[in-house]
Amino acid sequence: MPCPYVYSRCKISFLLNKNSHLNYILRLADSPMILGQRLSEWCGHGPILEQDIALTNIALDFIGQARNLYQYAAEVEGKGRTEDDFAFLRDPLDYKNVLLVEQPNGNWGQTIMRQFLYDSFNFYFYNELKNSTDTQISAIAEKSSKEIKYHLRYSSEWVVRLGDGTEESHAKMQNALDDMWMYSGELCAPDALDKEMATAGIGVDLDKIRPYIVEKVDAVLTRATLQKPESSWMQSGGKQGKHSEHLGFILAEMQFMQRAYPEAEW
Amino acid sequence: MSKKNWPLWEIFIRSKQGLNHKHVGSLHAVNSEMAIENARDVYTRRQEGVSIWVVESVHITASNPDASEELFEPATDKVYRHPTFYDLPDEVKHM
């Protein structure tokens, strides 16, 4: 039986860095928050009624996931902040979403391509996240997985429909793929925080899921008759708070009301 | 979006407590798979149902309202077609 002093020290270092835990939860929340915001820009502007509803449903799914995670982050931080404080009062440098989700919507094809690249990662990521030793994260992952399964089905089908479509739709999808490709690597490139959380059993081991994602993306792109870009150079920095110029504009629009009228409520 | 490539589909939804699919509306889609997904997005987002049937509208034949007289009126005065002349024993309460 180890002496009590040694035992409690071991316990503290086993209870990983509390900041890391919080930062990881915020990182999980920020990507769906920004992607939900981007997708909601389509509201009322969809090419066809049913797709307008489909995309905005998906946007709501993401915002719901972000809410669950921000609420949990507030609990873990324990300083009295709320989900709204995290969403509406943090600056771009504090946001840890991946670069992919802040890219512009562009045309329908570009939105779908961005969505597909994100969904193929998200599906395998959340599948693993269900096994998190953090029971709250695991519960959130369990619920979100069902939504994400539908997202992947939806975006994959559209990639194939447009890729293996007319000459025009094929060209637009190839352009979209060429544009978005360099943002796809960041999704499963583990950094120090990812590795720390995976080791602690809380986060996902990105190296483990990468082969499945690659297989899925390859399969869909092949069916869509699209050419995967050859370049392996990838953009990164979003997870560390280094964003493209787009995020500033997204947050300005999203946060304006809360910042201009603090404490305002519906 | 041309009418040829995006035909109209009639949507039928069965609710969780229901035994039959009810007609809830229509939408456009390219094929039956997309019609199911569109129906899921448009007609089940408030938990309206647990099962979806889609039928391309051209496959539905409706009765002609002008023919309502000969189709439906003859049944109004044939009370013997309803099983209401029997005394049901108590044991068969829920007939």
Image (cartoon, coloured by chain):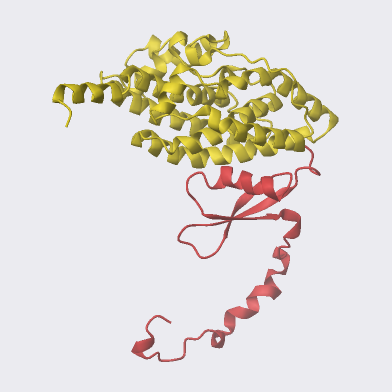
Q: Is residue B30 above or below residue A86?
A: below
Report whether residue A95 is seen: yes
Percent from the top left, x then y, of residue B74?
Answer: 64, 79
Residue drawn at (57%, 61%) of the image: B21
Depth check: give the residue in front, B62 or A13. Answer: A13
Q: Inspect this view and state whether residue A57 appears.
A: no
A67 displayed left or right of A3 = right
Q: Is residue A174 left or right of residue A154?
A: right
Identify the residue shown where x is 53% and y is 84%: B82
The front one of A257 and A216 is A216
Residue A119 at x, y percent in the picture: 58, 32
Taking the spot 44% from the left edge, 12% from the top edge, the residue there is A256
Q: Is residue A128 above or below residue B23?
A: above
State which quarter of the image contains the C terminus of chain A. Answer: top left
Name of the residue lying farthest toward the right: A167
The one nearer the camera, B89 or A182, is A182
Q: Is residue A181 left or right of residue A67?
A: right
Query: Chain B appears what colour?
Result: red
The residue that appears at 32% across and 16% down in the rendered structure is A263
Q: Quadrant of the N terminus of chain A?
A: top left
Residue A219 in picture, x, y percent from top left: 71, 37
The hue used for chain A is yellow
